[in-house]
Amino acid sequence: MNQRWSERGVKRYIDRYAPVYGEALAVRIYTSQLLGKNPELVLHGGGNTSVKAAFGTLVGESIPALYVKGSGWDMAVTGPEGFVPMDLRQLSALKKLEDLSDQAMIEQFMVAMLKPCSFHPSIETLAHAWIKSAYVDHTHANAILTLTNRSDGEQIVREALDEEVLVRPYLHPGFSLSKDIAQALEANPHVLGVVLMHHGLFTFDDDPRVSYENHIELVEKAKGYIKKHISRSFFSFKLEAVPDSLLPEITPFIRGALSARTEDPDHPFRPVILRVLRDQKMLEIISHPRWEELIRGPVLTADFLIRTKPWIAWVDAPDLQDQNHLKDQIREVVHRFVERYTSYYEEGVRRNGHSSPMFDPQPRILVIPKLGVFCSGPTLKEALIAADLAQTTLEVKAKIAAMGGRYQGIEEDRLFEMEYWEPQLAKLSGQSGALAGKVAIVTGAAGAIGSAICRRLLEEGCVVVGTDIAEERLGSLEGELASEFGENFLGYPMDVTDEASVQEALREISLRFGGVDILIPNAGIALVKPLDELDLEDFRRIYRVNVEGMLLFLKWGARVLKNQGTGGDIIFISTKNVPSPGASFGAYSATKAAAHQLARVASLELAPFGIRVNNLAPDAVFKSGQRRSGLWEVCGPERMKARGLDEKGLEDYYRNRNLLKIQVQAEHVANGVVFFATRQTPTTGATLPIDGGLPDATPR
Ligand SMILES: [Zn+2]
């Protein structure tokens, strides 16, 4: 990581932002992004920057202002909208106070803001205001934390960075930390930076380039020191192989164990998404002869806590040969963690007089030595953040051990203060959508109904895996959904008629997200032929997809659900043809009826595991947007010809045959899926018609 400052780069930012926001802020955005784009310096909203510059009012006054990064904004991408202009005179005046509570400090921030904002300025705003230089850069760089987070940290920082920096003890971010920094700098105005124990680095200068380059130089110096003192032999040991089948089997179980229980019988668990880390580096750390030392102790910095919890949980001497024994071990570890966390919370509340409700007490990070690091979060995004923070924590701890040091994190009572600190809580996005934290698999996702179901589930916050054999159409669906829903949608090729393909897909999906909660068997094909013309091979082709495909998906999906132990929902896309078959539709109606019966049997077998199985019975759906259904391709043109109708005429025909005179849309079916998946009623084994009212198709 070297200096990345380029005059061309600066000019680009000045050209783009200076005409509206002024040159000072334009350059501020440039160096903030340089710092933010480097994961060794900044992770997921950590770190912050500021610049002191004039703020012009509507009536032409010029006010000295601090433009400081908003809390939770990602420095890698933050533009002018992420910097809050604040009245510098007001912020400076606060330094006269002896003390200021967090609550009062936040209020003062609101008072000093020069433009209305929907977010808070950085919790380190006062430090930015009171450091005299125009530009202030602050990160939680890994290399700095590798020096500070050890028992002899202060001495090591001085050894590594000479007299160029001030070293300050860990203090709760806010008024007292800011005052400590400001006073220390008044006494020593010529240092290049301030290192905060267990926290990070500040650099500053009136020249943005100098502040940035000092920052990089100090981090490079820390890295050089670490490199020099690391023992190369620390990682020279042989990795033990673990049985191949273990990981895909144990991952859904772990997901279940990390999901908190609730008192609500309709939603007895709060599911989490998992991300498993097991690259070479992670395996070396968690398989190390001294692995326990590398995991023990709190996470690296206070701003990790809301994503990771204070500590990583681990299984002592895991039995990797006996899965049942390993499951018992995991249960026990989670149980002990929940007890420890609950008493840590109760103690913290008692000491701090806090009123925030307790987070789910399950661990967010669980290590099974030799096997993997299992990171969880209430959404995929938060699971990915937890995984990055866990990886960084373990890497830094390993480096400290390889240097012969002893890890020392923040003290326990300080951990609680930060984990439940109001400005930190504001960074949590909260649950978005009724199905947040759940994973659904939709078969036949590339078709009209399948794609509409995927979209509706995504809108409810679900992680959705769309499977299909039509890889090209699946790819186009993925492209369409990616811009809106990002990584929450995954297209995965799967052939429901091939048992190996179904098994492999469920294994891969479990490894990727931790497991699955909602299965939507939707893949189906149709054929229009009277019985006396029906070729046996044609019938078998329909049967393989509609019946065997249903069976295989149910079989392997139910195994994952049972292993996970958190219940689940299966919603079969049946058809009105089951209760009310149509002429020339024998192969379709009979095979769908068989699949429908499988779903009803599944509802009997799976109810004891909290798994609900229901059916939707739509009447003909021909398209969703531009996407034609398979049914349309098979029977649309033929039906038009037989009835002497055009496309519009055929749609009218179907609409006019139901009581409500409504054309059934793919989106109606998708709404039915959401109805069952969100568990609006205590229902299983039922069929919901989605047909506008067809008396002879009403289930009896
Ligand atoms: Zn900080």
Image: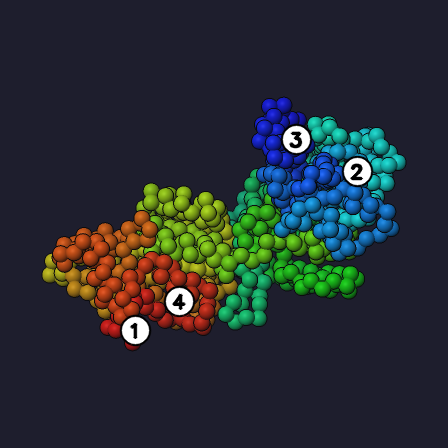
Tell me the crowding category of disc 1: few under 14, some 14 to 19, or many 20 or more residues within 10 angstroms, Cα based: some
Image quadrant in which you'd find residue 300? top right
Where disc 2 sits, the SS reads loop
Which residue, as the protein is rendered here, is positioned at the far bottom? 700
Of label 2 and label 4, which has the lower sequence position? 2
Q: Position of residue 652 (x, y in %)?
A: 23, 60
User: Label 1's element?
Assistant: loop
Q: Kindly indicate whether the residue at mark 2 contacts the one at mark 3 (C-beta within 8 angstroms).
A: no
- Eye-nearest disc, 2 or 4: 2
Q: Quadrant of the N terminus?
A: top right
Amino acid carrying label 1: it is Pro
- Residue assigned mark 4: 613
Q: Nearer the viewer, mark 2 or mark 1?
A: 2
Please name the residue that numbered disc 3 is placed on.
Answer: 23
**Residue at numbered disc 1:** 699
For disc 2, the marked residue is: 131
Q: Nearer the viewer, residue 172 or 91?
A: 91
For the residues labelled 2 and 4, the Cα–Cα distance comes to 62 Å
Indicate if the residue with disc 2 has its beta carbon within 8 Å of ligand 1: no
Mark 2 and mark 1 lie on one chain; the one further toward the N terminus is 2
Q: Amino acid at mark 4?
A: Val
Which of disc 3 and disc 1 is earlier in sequence?
A: 3
Residue 537 % position (x, y): 18, 54
